[in-house]
Image (cartoon, rainbow, N blue to C red):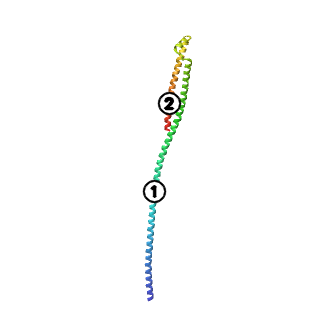
Amino acid sequence: MLLSRHLKRLTAASASVAVLLGGVLIATSSADLQSQINANRATAASLQAQIDSASAQIGRTAGGVAAAQQRLDGINAQLDQHIAALRSIDEQLLSAGQRLDTLERKLHLASNYLAANLRAQYESGAPNLIDVILNAHGFANLLERVNFIRDAQHSDAQIISVTRTVRARVQGQALHLGQLERQG
């Protein structure tokens, strides 16, 4: 019995030691587990902070890109307006050049006609009223010659007026053309 008692005590002591050692081991592994949990939480918190920082940076970059796109859209709109204005000026320039060419041709024709008329009057001698009266063969012929001279003078006056008008238009068109060229 003594042996069995010792055995019982030994078994109880062994069991107590095992429980204590198991508790220590459990406490040690529990502490290790808690420190691993804390380390994982710290890592997770660090990763979350990095994600938040990267997200904020992406947000700032996206905002910057959006602002830059908005500025670019504004600049493109202005560019489109300038291109449209330049096209309009080019069309006006072409039209003004064509009008100038037409007016210069008219001026050239009128100047040539006036020069030919002046040359003809010089070569044939300009009739005056006394020559018309003295050279007339009757009253009807006199009226015809006077009307002819009056019509010729009226025609010359109209040609001179047209020439002056066309010359003024040519000068005005040339100035307008110069302004358009400076704008373009």
Q: Position of residue 66 (x, y in %)?
A: 47, 51
Most foreground residue, 39 or 176? 176
Q: Amino acid at mark 2?
A: Gln
* Residue contact between numbered discs 2 and 1, judged by CB atoms under 8 Å: no
The image quadrant that residue 139 belongs to is top right
Q: Is residue 49 above or below residue 86?
A: below
- Disc 2 to disc 1, how far (Cα)? 65 Å
Q: Position of residue 84 (x, y in %)?
A: 50, 40
Looking at this view, name the residue that lies furthest to the front: 123
Q: Position of residue 131 (x, y in %)?
A: 53, 13
Q: Which residue is mark 2?
A: 171
Most foreground residue, 34 or 131? 131
Mark 2 residue element:
helix
Q: Amino acid at mark 1?
A: Gln
Q: Is residue 131 above or below residue 97?
A: above
Mark 1 residue element:
helix
Q: Is residue 13 above or below residue 38?
A: below
Most foreground residue, 146 or 67? 146
Graded by Cα atoms within 10 Å as few (under 14), some (14 to 19) or many (20 or more), the crowding at tag 2 reads some
Lower sequence index among marks 2 and 1: 1
Taking the spot 44% from the left edge, 78% from the top edge, the residue there is 21
